């Protein structure tokens, strides 16, 4: 019986997808920046961090403006990091698969290079953000562009905002001011 249990465990482990280097702390994460270089989340210890998945093909969305306004107002205590992603359907009027090279997102906050935010090849930061086993807050599914994750000054995930909740919504502002 023990041999059967051991063999079953070995079999299950062999076919369990391995998460790519998911760190224990948000501050252990470094990602490529859109404009070159690296974004090191440890640089933001002591500040709130709002992480947003943003559409790579649509740099004119009003949420970019709202996020930029939020960042400018609270930049002493808050950093916003947008992660460019193409994980959802292309917006009407957009051309699928356009390159992001040379785009100007016209924001003052850091923009990370394009990552996958869903599926088997999900970026490690999104494993951390979406799985309670890593973030100790909740397991969530990314519903669409502009889903927001708020991390407090100690590096703990404290709020998740649905994509329909805009950056200038009272709930977001109250959480940032808390």
Image (cartoon, rainbow, N blue to C red):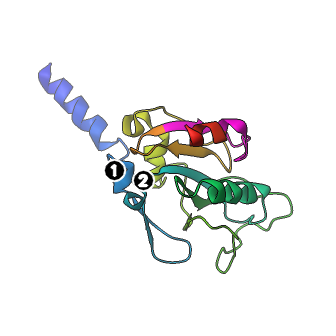
Relative to 160, is 79 above or below? Answer: below
Residue ID at (38%, 44%):
154
**Does 123 sit left or right of 85 as displayed?**
left
For the residue carrying disc 2, how many other residues have a C-alpha within 10 Å: few (<14), some (14-19), or many (20+)? Answer: many
Question: Magenta part of the protein: which range?
Answer: 158-171
Q: CA distance from mark 2 to mark 1?
A: 8 Å
Q: Is residue 114 above or below residue 77?
A: below
Q: Secondary structure at mark 1?
A: loop
User: Residue 78 location in percent, x, y?
Assistant: 54, 53
Q: Is residue 116 magenta?
A: no
Please identify the residue farthest to the bottom as the structure is shown. 102
- Would residue 141 be seen by someone viewing this image from the given angle? no
**Which of the labelled discs sits on residue 124, or is there none?**
2
Secondary-structure class at tag 2: helix
Q: Quadrant of the N terminus?
A: top left
Residue shown at 63% from the left, 45% from the top: 147
Residue 158 in the figure: left or right of residue 11 = right
First along the sequence among labels 2 and 1: 1
For the question of whether residue 10 can be seen, the reply is: yes
Q: Is residue 37 left or right of residue 101?
A: left
Q: Which residue is mark 1?
A: 23
């Amino acid at each position: 019986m023990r041999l059967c249990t051991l063999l079953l465990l070995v079999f299950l482990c062999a076919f369990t997808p391995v998460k790519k280097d998911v760190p224990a702390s948000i501050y252990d994460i470094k990602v490529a920046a859109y404009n070159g270089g690296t974004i090191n989340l440890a640089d933001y210890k002591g500040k709130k961090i709002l992480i947003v998945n943003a559409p790579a093909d649509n740099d004119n969305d009003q949420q970019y403006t709202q996020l930029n306004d939020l960042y400018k107002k609270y930049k002493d205590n808050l950093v916003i990091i947008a992660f460019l992603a193409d994980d959802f359907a292309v917006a009407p009027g957009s051309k699928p698969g356009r390159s992001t090279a040379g785009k100007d997102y016209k924001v003052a906050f850091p923009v990370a290079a394009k990552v996958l935010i869903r599926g088997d090849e999900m970026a490690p930061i999104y494993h951390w953000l979406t799985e309670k086993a890593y973030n100790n807050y909740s397991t969530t599914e990314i519903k669409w562009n502009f889903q927001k994750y708020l991390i407090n000054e100690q590096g703990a995930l404290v709020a998740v905002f649905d994509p329909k909740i805009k950056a200038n919504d009272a709930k977001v502002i109250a959480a940032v001011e808390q």
